[in-house]
Image (cartoon, rainbow, N blue to C red):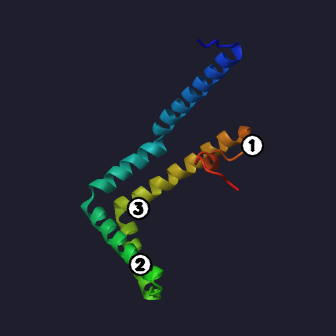
Amino acid sequence: MSIETDANAASADDRTTVEDVASDLGEAIAETPEHEAFEDARRAVQESEEAQSKIEEFESTRQEFMLARQSGEATQADLQELQGTQQELHSIPVMADFLEAQNELQARLEALDDAISAPLALDFGDNIGGCCND
C-alpha cells in the first residue's frame, strides 16, 4: 500500500500540468500559419512528380559524391555537379515554396525556443535531445 503525501500529490499535479501545457503548446504550434504553410508546401512537394524526380536525382548525385569523397576521388567538378543538381531542385517552384515555408517555420520555432529558454536560464531546444552538451 502506498501513502501519497501532499508533496507527492503536488509533484504529480505539476507534472500533469506541465505536460498538459506542453501538449497545448504543440497543438498551438500545429495551428500557426507557419506550420500550416509548411505542411501545405510539404504535401505539394510530395505530390509533384517533377520535384520527386529531382529529389531522386539529387540524392543519387549526393550519394555518388559522398562515396567519391570518402575514397579521396571527389573532384571540384563533382562538387559543382552536386551543387548544380541542388540548384535545379531548389528552383522548382514547389520546392522553392517548401524551402521558404521551412525557413519561416524554423524562425518561428527558434523564437518559441527563446521564449521557453528565458525563464529556464538554458537553451531549451539544445537540451531536449536527451544527450549531454559540453
Is residue 14 shown above or below 80? Answer: above
* Rendered location of residue 89, percent (x, y): 37, 68
Task: Kindly identify the residue that appears in the image at 66 percent across and 22 percent down.
Answer: 11
Disc 2 or 1, which lies upstream in sequence? 2
Ranked by sequence position, the earlier of labels 1 and 3 is 3
Of the residues shown, which amino acid type is indicated by label 3? Ala
Position above or below: 93 against 68: above
- Quarter the C terminus occupies: bottom right
The amino acid at mark 1 is Ala
| The residue positioned farthest toward the right in the image shown | 121
The label on residue 6 is: none
Q: Residues within 10 Å of mark 3 (few under 14, many from 20)?
A: some
Q: Which residue is mark 1?
A: 121
Give the percent coordinates (x, y) of residue 43.
33, 50
> Disc 2, disc 1: CB below 8 Å?
no
Label 3 secondary element = helix
Q: Which residue is mark 2?
A: 67
Q: Position of residue 100 (x, y in %)?
A: 46, 57
Q: Amino acid at mark 2?
A: Leu
